[in-house]
Amino acid sequence: MQLSLICFAPEESVYVKGDAATHLYIIRRGIVGAHGRVLGMGNFFGEDVILRSSTRLWPVFCLTYLDVYTLSREDLHEILADGQYPTIQKSVRRAIMKLAFRRNVLMFLNNTDPDQLRAIAGAAAAAAA
């Protein structure tokens, strides 16, 4: 496993929507704006790296100078394959399922006409009543 330290300047993008998800980022120092939240020291982002053939769903921008440690997808999978961290492996597996489900829902919502969504929601509400 190798963590690499990377530095970014204020207002620089760490990655943009559509970039390949190849690394997980752990904030050492600084603040970023990531998927509607402000994250600082000790937080992480880029968790979609655990999905195979994943692309970023949102951009991440630096709000201050930023130092982050990066962990590649290959290194993460190597750590998990070692078998020394079964609890973490289960947590990662759960996170993969949640992220995959969220991606599928977002893709469905983005590719469905708003009138169709209203009809589906109406039918579901009627069935629940």
Image (cartoon, rainbow, N blue to C red):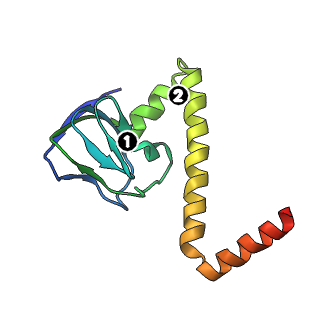
Packing grade of label 1 (10 A; few <14, some 14-19, many >=20) is: some
Q: Residue drawn 53% across and 28% down?
A: 81
- In 3D space, how far apart are the residues under numbered discs 2 and 1 (Cα atoms)? 22 Å
For the residues carrying marks 2 and 1, which lies nearer the camera in this image?
1
Residue ID for mark 1: 45
Tag 2 residue:
81
Where 64 sits versus 20, above or below?
above
Q: What residue type is labelled 1?
A: Phe
Q: Which residue is drawn at 56% across and 40% down?
A: 95
Residue 113 placement (x, y as % from top left):
60, 80
Packing grade of label 2 (10 A; few <14, some 14-19, many >=20) is: few
Residue at point 58% right, 22% down?
87
Frontmost residue, 46 versus 82: 46
Q: Where is residue 31 in the image (x, y as percent from the top left)?
A: 24, 40
Q: What residue type is labelled 2?
A: Ala
Please identify the quarter of the rendering in which residue 19 is found.
bottom left
Q: Which mark is residue 88?
A: none
Numbered disc 1: secondary structure: strand
